[in-house]
Image (spheres, helix red, strand yellow):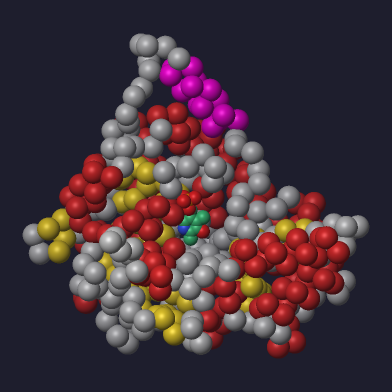
């Protein structure tokens, strides 16, 4: 008789977005005349930029001719894209990352979930709290997290690093030594980030204790402040301790197109074994490459035209973020984020829990956000709003909240 991977059975139900959906649907059914504004889910709304659409069309036409048709893509990505990434995301920032240290994939979520399998099941992970749930849940599936305490909503073998107002939503070095450290800056859900010298401390720490940092930089394009690192490889020594995850979803609207990449420097080794070769082996065995047309679209992200158009797209969302941040501040809310990230993190007013505030906001302002407790115990009493809506809806939502 077969057995299932019973690590899956340890996962607590992920009720966050389904509970939100149910509550919103129930409210809408009872109040058909109310216009509900959704600033909850972290998905983009602006269409693909013209430069990207053009590249897609050209690539589609190439697929129609035998002379230019492409079959399987190279496992690790087309050279044209890996070169464009190395040049624009790394060399232009003074970071030494070669094209063959870049692994093109269909997105950062898959890579964030899959990367753990090249590490021993004995490794101990450290995560921020609140956290992007993928990091924890994929380690649960692999059997790396111990026993779940449903009252405290924590796993016995996971090191949690609270990110709260008191520490500026930046994790502190853990007391217990981890083997794998997941960091995401600019952060989802808090919208906060760290300075280059703060990140340097993590790199130094990881090199000292022999840990690997898995650095999720999906929101890099939203950085507006000088002192915030765009990549972990701006830090000295990161080549020997850090893996970086990147995505085309948030900077270029590829959430439905699917493209991302992972960087593993060849200096990153466990004894004689390079993680680069393990991930190359994994990719070669389990992955058959991102689609040619999508990689051409990714290349267009780095064209002069593409860069200019995407700068505007990011500015559109960040203008929303500014409106939310300033509007809520003026209404007396305690807010953070929204400067280097499209997320605004606010404290639920009047001692409300995150779900109480969710219900209150839905009922009184017909605005939907995400309760912070869905991202971890330290998210309780916090609430996330996203800047990914339309400007008109964002303004209306904030104005309604101000009028409460
Ligand atoms: C949106 C997001 C990603 C991107 O995921 P894709 O699979 O590339 O769409 C990665 N990490 C975080 C924290 C995100 O919020």
Q: Main secondary structure of the magenta part?
A: helix
Up/down of 182 relative to 258, above or below: below
In terms of depth relative to the viewer, which is nearer, 364 or 245?
364
* Residue sitting at the far front: 1
| 55 in magenta | yes
Give the left or right position of residue 325, taking residue 295 as reference. Answer: right
Report the front residue among 9 and 364: 9
- Residue 166 shown left or right of residue 229 in the figure: right
Q: Quadrant of the C terminus?
A: bottom right
In the depicted structure, whether residue 240 falls above or below residue 150: above
* Residue at point 75%, 74% (across, down): 359
Q: Residue at x 75, y 51 (%)?
A: 391
On screen, residue 250 above or below 326: above
Residue 304 drawn in magenta = no
User: In the figure, is residue 123 to the left or right of 166?
Assistant: left
Q: Position of residue 90 (x, y in %)?
A: 35, 48
Which residue sits at x=29%, y=40%? 76
Q: Quadrant of residue 309?
A: top right
Q: Position of residue 105 (x, y in %)?
A: 37, 44
Q: Is residue 307 visible?
A: yes
Start-end of magenta stretch: 50-63
Left/right placement of residue 151 relative to residue 282 reads right
298 in relation to 330, above or below? above
| Residue 42 image point, x, y percent | 60, 57
Q: Is residue 303 visible?
A: no
* Viewport quadrant of the N terminus: bottom left
Q: Position of residue 300 (x, y in %)?
A: 48, 32
Q: Quadrant of residue 197?
A: bottom left
């Amino acid at each position: 008789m077969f057995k299932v991977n019973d690590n899956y059975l340890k996962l607590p139900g992920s009720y966050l977005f389904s509970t939100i959906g149910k509550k919103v649907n129930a409210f809408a059914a009872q109040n058909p005349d109310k216009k509900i504004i959704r600033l909850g889910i972290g998905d983009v709304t602006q269409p693909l930029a013209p430069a990207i659409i053009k590249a897609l069309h050209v690539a589609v036409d190439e697929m129609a001719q035998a002379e230019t048709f492409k079959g399987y893509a190279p496992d690790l990505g087309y050279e044209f894209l890996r070169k464009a990434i190395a040049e624009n995301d790394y060399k232009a920032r003074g970071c030494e990352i070669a094209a063959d240290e870049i692994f093109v994939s269909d997105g950062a979520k898959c890579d964030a979930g899959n990367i753990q399998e090249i590490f021993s099941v004995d490794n101990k992970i450290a995560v921020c709290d609140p956290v992007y749930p993928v990091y924890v849940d994929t380690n649960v599936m692999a059997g790396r997290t111990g026993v779940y305490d449903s009252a405290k909503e924590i796993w016995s073998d996971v090191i949690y690093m609270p990110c709260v107002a008191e520490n500026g939503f930046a994790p502190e070095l853990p007391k217990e030594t981890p083997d794998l450290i997941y960091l995401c800056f600019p952060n989802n859900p808090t919208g906060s980030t760290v300075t280059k010298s703060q990140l340097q401390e993590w790199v130094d720490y990881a090199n000292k204790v022999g840990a690997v940092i898995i650095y999720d930089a999906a929101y890099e394009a939203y950085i507006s402040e000088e002192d915030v690192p765009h990549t972990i490889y701006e830090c000295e020594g990161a080549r020997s301790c850090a893996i970086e995850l990147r995505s085309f979803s948030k900077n270029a609207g590829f959430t439905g197109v699917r493209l991302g990449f992972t960087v593993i420097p060849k200096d990153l080794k466990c004894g004689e074994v390079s993680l680069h070769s393990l991930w190359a082996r994994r990719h070669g065995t389990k992955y058959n490459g991102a689609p040619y047309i999508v990689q051409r679209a990714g290349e267009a992200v780095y064209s002069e035209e593409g860069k200019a158009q995407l700068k505007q797209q990011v500015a559109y969302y960040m203008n929303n973020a500014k409106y939310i941040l300033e509007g809520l501040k003026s209404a007396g809310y305690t807010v953070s984020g929204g400067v280097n990230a499209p997320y605004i993190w606010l404290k639920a007013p009047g001692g409300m829990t995150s779900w109480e505030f969710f219900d209150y906001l839905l009922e009184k302002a017909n605005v939907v956000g995400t309760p912070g407790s869905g991202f971890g115990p330290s998210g309780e009493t916090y609430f996330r709003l996203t800047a990914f809506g339309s400007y008109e809806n964002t303004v209306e939502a904030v104005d309604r909240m101000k009028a409460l």
